[in-house]
Image (cartoon, rainbow, N blue to C red):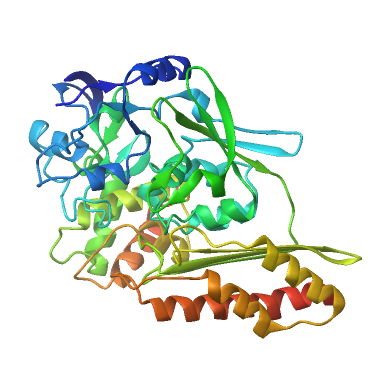
Amino acid sequence: MVEAYKPNDLKEALELLAFNDCTIFAGGTDLMVKRKRWSGLVPSFEKPVMFISQLQELREVTEDNGMLTIGAACTLSELIDNELIPEHFKTVFRQMASPGIRNIATIGGNICNASPAGESLPLLYALDAEVVLQSSCRKVELPIAEFVQGVGKTLLKSGEMVTAIKVPKSSFTSITYRKVGTRKSTALSKLSFIGLAASDEEGLQDVRLAFGAVAPTVVRSRDAEEDIIDMLKLGSLDISQIIDDYSTLIKPISDQRSTALYRKKACIRLLVDFIINSLAREVVR
Amino acid sequence: MAMDISFVVNGKRVNIYGNPTARLLDALRDYCGLTGVKEGCGEGECGACSVLVDGKLVNSCIYPIAKVEGKEVLTIEGFRGTEKYEVLKESFEAAGAVQCGFCSPGMLMAAESLLRENPKPDEVQVREAISGNLCRCTGYNTIVEAVLDASIRGEGLW
């Protein structure tokens, strides 16, 4: 049986982390499955376990100067019920897992698990979220696309903990989120797509497109987004060019959930549908 | 390292000195003898182990006992004595929503969790609320019918 810690506040947690290489345990909905053994046996952990979901500092949602700060140990259900959380976040969270899991699973856990199918990730990439990392001696903020390095890999170092996620508040006139899975609930996605756009009287100002589960990390290209905006501004929409741009970025694999071919085709269709049915409409507005 | 963990199960105080990463499911079944809490998949997919922790539905197979310290757990055994349970039970019986019965305790806890938050759900909301509970017998329609029926017959209870 390994050592287990249940610190009372963040300071105590960070001090413990400074001297102990711990497995950080928030909701545990991924950890308990990965560590599960035969029925009736206690899940096995090699490193000391530190429970953090009781830390009040990690459970708060605040808004300050247009910056939304979400505590890493907020559960998905808590975020769905929180009035500071914008509706497009909730659309994503409501489609994650099932009610019982959403009551336990945390947003910080979904990020640190760094699964290609992590369902909060496309949203957070599209919103330019920053991950707040804290250790006993420092606090840094990293763009989520830098923090997540690959399948299950992040820049989290020993002694550090993700304490919050910061998202600049922005408003969108067009929001599309599609999770494609075998069933609606409790399914990991075959792929997911989020498309956000903002326009004003002068036309389309902002486009953000992100794809989940079709590459080791979320696919998002600012260059391609800029090209789309320019094309629509100039009235010279070249869909095959956009498809080409994204086809080189979307590199899915075949696994037990879906095939590479299906994933790629579905992504391209969702992309084209968003451009024709949402963006072109934004331009007409 | 073993930890002292104290919590309330169905109104009774329980003290366990044990491995904090042990599953709540095992503590309830083996230590408390509450075998209404079932293990299906053991990985949070099927909902057969659903219980309420501080009024919130959770899958007890992926919930370590360290996290239940100081909290209140309600299982089907604790829910059984209540008027709300009787209404749900009658509705499940009348609709034919119980066949093999393995999913029923979890299904009833999911229904109770829904009705506590939303005493007058529509069909979509009922389907969403039981979406984490698998049933291999009924095809779900009778269960949805039962929960809707209970919400009408049990008006004022939730």
Residue extending farthest to the right is A202
Which image quarter: residue B139?
bottom left
The total of numbered circles placed on residues is 0
Residue occupying image coordinates x 45% and y 30%: A161
Observer able to see residue A172 = yes
- Which of the two residues, A67 or B85, is positioned nearer the viewer here? A67
Residue occupying image coordinates x 77% and y 77%: A281
Observer able to see residue B157 = no
- Which of the two residues, B10 or A106, is positioned nearer the viewer here? A106
Residue extending farthest to the front is A248
Height in image: B13 above or below A197?
A: above
- Left/right placement of residue B23 relative to residue A7 reads left
Q: Position of residue A145 (x, y in %)?
A: 55, 49
- Left/right placement of residue B31 relative to residue A81 reads left
Q: Position of residue A248 (x, y in %)?
A: 54, 73
Height in image: A184 above or below A140?
A: below
Residue occupying image coordinates x 44% and y 28%: A160
- Which of the two residues, A270 or B12, is positioned nearer the viewer here? A270
Q: Position of residue B40 (x, y in %)?
A: 17, 55
Q: Position of residue B84 (x, y in %)?
A: 32, 46
- Left/right placement of residue A108 relative to residue B37 reads right
Q: Quadrant of the C terminus of chain A?
A: bottom right
Q: Quadrant of the N terminus of chain A?
A: top left
